[in-house]
Image (spheres, grey):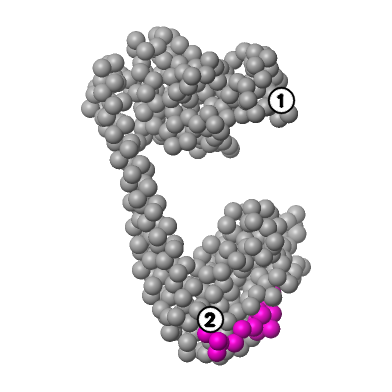
Amino acid sequence: MKTAWEVRPLGEVCTLATGGTPKRSESSYFEGGKIKWLVSGDIHQKEIHDCEGRITELGLATSNARYLPKNSVMIALNGQGKTRGAVALLRTKATCNQSLVSIMPNNSEKLLPEFLFANLHGRYEEIRKMTGDSGNDRRGLNMPLIRSIEIPIPPLEEQKQIVAVLDAAFEGLTRAKENAETNLQNARELFESYISDRLKEMNATEISLSEMIDAGWITSHLDGNHGSNYPKKAEFTESGVPYASANCIVDGEIDLSLAKHLPAERADTLVKGTAHNLDVIFAHNATVGPVAVLETDEERVLLGTSVTHYRCDPQFLNPYFLCFEMRGSEFVRQYQSVMGQATRNQVPITIQRKFTHRIPDLQSQLKLATDARSVEAYSKNLVSNYQAKLQDIADLRQSLLQKAFAGELT
């Protein structure tokens, strides 16, 4: 930071204001309202021109909500995920609830709102840590903390130059980020599309899971629903019989080092939901979709309530093929459709048995499984490259912000 720049706490150079929430039980405070009313989730816009929330004049009059200065900087005091500490510029006449604070420079000839926004935006992580935690809990910011944040105040012309340089740079970075995100999504979908396209070329038989069970292609299909016999937290130990849940399916493989364990005598009381080597494991609850083949020397692996095993008769069905087939776009669409109609992410075992699969002859299964491994490796490499590009863009953005407020861009 240039030594000639003045540094002042926000509370000395800005006016801070928050809002309030009209009584929820009074419908007249909300229904038919035309006054814009911001909540913490609205902060995730660089510039706020509109929002979904509305209150009525009566709701405004009977609550702590108030009209906020247009062009003020909004900061979130709390909120889920990455919300706390995020900032945005308010470009419209609006009110807010108590989870947001408006920060308006007292003298726009001395401190530009756009400069203030850029500075606070670049210090996001620093501001989040002001609550005294590692950033993982729910403690929020407050007015005294916000007022104490020290802001560098360059001469007005330098502020204008810094804002102009950052705007131009960030416009290019935004386009680059959008392109990288599109490419990343395409890379992730490449494998799903490849599997479905190959199955269409193979003249595969479309057959339901229930029919495969009846035909003996699938010899066991069970989840880890242990009912009232579900193990309690205190019963798990550091070693013993692995107890695997959806979190053990990582990047197309099953990592049993992430599993819990039960003593052998306690494991013996669980009569269902036991997986063996080469079972296909499908995550069906909360985190739906991950699927992998269990490769283990363990005599048995117990399954948690979030996963289901598919045991294949190798005379008819190759487990690696089935695993890849269940990662194809045709199968993905089936469970996503079920999830879209439910209030929570889960695909019960009874619903799974209604899903159809595309199964070619055994020789074709083996050929596709082999080819799919190569395509999967290529797809993973693409994903890794685009993730690295996104990180490079984020690092460059942060570097520009640091240079800007060190006086190195003017």
Can you tell which mark lies on residue 85? none
Q: How many marks?
A: 2
Report the residue that reaches farthest toward the left.
201
Q: Which residue is mark 2?
A: 1
SS at mark 1? helix
Picture quadrant where residue 223 is located: top right
Depth check: give the residue in front, 223 or 64.
Answer: 223
- Residue at position x 46%, y 18% in the image: 277
One can see residue 185 in this view: no
CA separation in Å, label 1 and label 2: 56 Å
Depth check: give the residue in front, 107 or 334.
Answer: 107
Estimate the x, y position of residue 214 in percent, counting from the top left.
Answer: 43, 9
Estimate the x, y position of residue 370 in percent, counting from the top left.
Answer: 28, 26
Can you tell which mark lies on residue 235? 1
- Residue at position x 59%, y 59% in the image: 83
The kind of residue on which mark 2 rests is: Met
Q: Which residues are magenta?
A: 1-17
